[in-house]
């Protein structure tokens, strides 16, 4: 029996292979999650259209229901006073009542179909959201594992006294993943929504411009505002990560600039006092 010997290089090579496989799996999960996000946005638009249509149909059903009741009462009254010589008039009333009844039942069926479609789409949306959250959670856990495998994994394992350092590093990685998730959520809820809307309106503008130039130009102005809002959201996210003033002018000036920004955006009055700190504050603390 031959004893197998493994060197540090062998172990690093194995870990490298593991990292490559994990990265490949992570990419596949991310692609699936990205596709689900696209499908989620499409389903949201479909649900919005169905709800608008359903609201119209419900109003029509209410009106037809009232008209149907009126026609039935009218039909009963006409049947009581109709003589053999006045059968033609009764027939006209009967046909009108029947037509109203058919329209009412047809519209009721349309309402039921739209309700079924709405409920099915709402279930689909819930499933998409749950699947996306699970995919994000899986990617976060993978990132934590990758972050540690790509770090000083071997060195830490060599010394049991450094287990506390290993735990601290894992906590840092977990905190980083929480922050990444927050940023991803802000991008998805903000600029990603504006840009997705802009993409759809570009196609709409192409059609409108061909039919009505003035209306098309107005749509383009609205589209420009959408893109501006997306750009503003992106700048806000970048600023929240690490304000430029923090890099250029220092901690105190950055705090004052942030206060001024809050005052301007929320129209409130803020008074501040920042005590001078001897020396330089660590960038992580800043």
Image (cartoon, grey):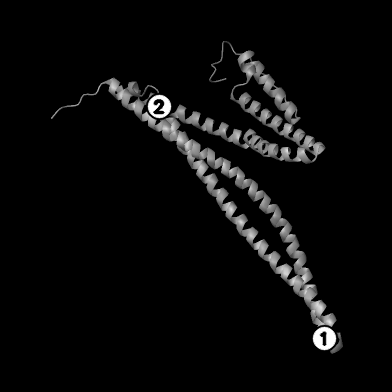
User: Is residue 156 in view from this perspective?
Assistant: yes
| 222 over 79 or under it: above or below | above
Residue beneath disc 2: 148
Residue 221 location (% of width, % of height)? 77, 33
In-front residue for pair 281/266: 266
Q: Residue at x 78, y 69 (%)?
A: 66
User: Is residue 160 in view from this perspective?
Assistant: no
Query: Position of 6 compared to 204: left or right?
Result: left
Residue beneath disc 1: 80
The C terminus: image quadrant: top right
Query: Position of 271 compared to 3: left or right?
Result: right
Which numbered disc, 2 or 1, marks the residue closer to the eye? Answer: 1
Label pair 2/1, CB-CB below 8 angstroms? no
User: Hey, which quadrant is residue 22 in on the image?
Assistant: top left
Which residue is most to the right? 85
| 46 over 97 or under it: above or below | above
2 or 1: tag closer to the N-terminus: 1
Q: Residue at x 76, y 39 (%)?
A: 210
Residue 118 location (% of width, % of height)? 62, 55
User: Hey, which quadrant is residue 213 in on the image?
Assistant: top right
Residue 198 location (% of width, % of height)? 68, 36
The N terminus: image quadrant: top left
In-front residue for pair 272/212: 212
Which residue is most to the bottom? 84
Q: Residue at x 67, y 49 (%)?
A: 48
In-front residue for pair 54/262: 54
Question: Gap between marks 2 and 1, in whole Å?
Answer: 90 Å
Q: Residues within 10 Å of mark 2 (few under 14, many from 20)?
A: some
């Amino acid at each position: 029996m031959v004893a197998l010997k493994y060197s540090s290089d062998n172990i690093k090579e194995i870990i490298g292979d593991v990292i490559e496989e994990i990265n490949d799996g992570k990419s596949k999960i991310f692609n699936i999650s990205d596709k689900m996000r696209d499908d989620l946005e499409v389903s949201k638009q479909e649900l919005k259209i169905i709800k608008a249509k359903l609201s119209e149909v419900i109003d029509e059903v209410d009106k037809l229901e009232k008209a149907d009741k009126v026609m039935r009462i009218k039909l009963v009254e006409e049947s009581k006073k109709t003589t053999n010589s006045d059968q033609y008039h009764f027939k006209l009333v009967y046909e009108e009542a029947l037509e109203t009844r058919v329209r009412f039942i047809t519209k009721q069926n349309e309402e039921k179909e739209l309700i079924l479609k709405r409920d099915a789409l709402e279930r689909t949306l819930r499933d998409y959201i749950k699947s996306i959250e699970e995919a994000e959670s899986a990617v976060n856990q993978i990132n934590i594992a990758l972050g540690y495998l790509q770090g000083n994994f071997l060195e830490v394992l060599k010394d049991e006294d450094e287990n506390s350092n290993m735990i601290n590093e894992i906590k840092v990685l977990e905190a980083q993943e929480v922050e990444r998730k927050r940023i991803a959520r802000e991008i998805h809820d903000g600029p990603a929504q504006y840009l997705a809307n802009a993409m759809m309106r570009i196609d709409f503008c192409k059609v409108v411009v061909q039919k009505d130039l003035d209306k098309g130009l107005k749509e383009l102005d609205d589209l420009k505002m959408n893109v501006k809002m997306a750009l503003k959201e992106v700048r806000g996210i970048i600023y929240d990560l690490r304000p430029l003033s923090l890099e250029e002018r220092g901690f105190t000036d950055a705090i004052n600039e942030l206060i001024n920004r809050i005052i301007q955006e929320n129209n409130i009055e803020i008074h501040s006092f920042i005590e001078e700190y001897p020396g330089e504050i660590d960038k992580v603390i800043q």
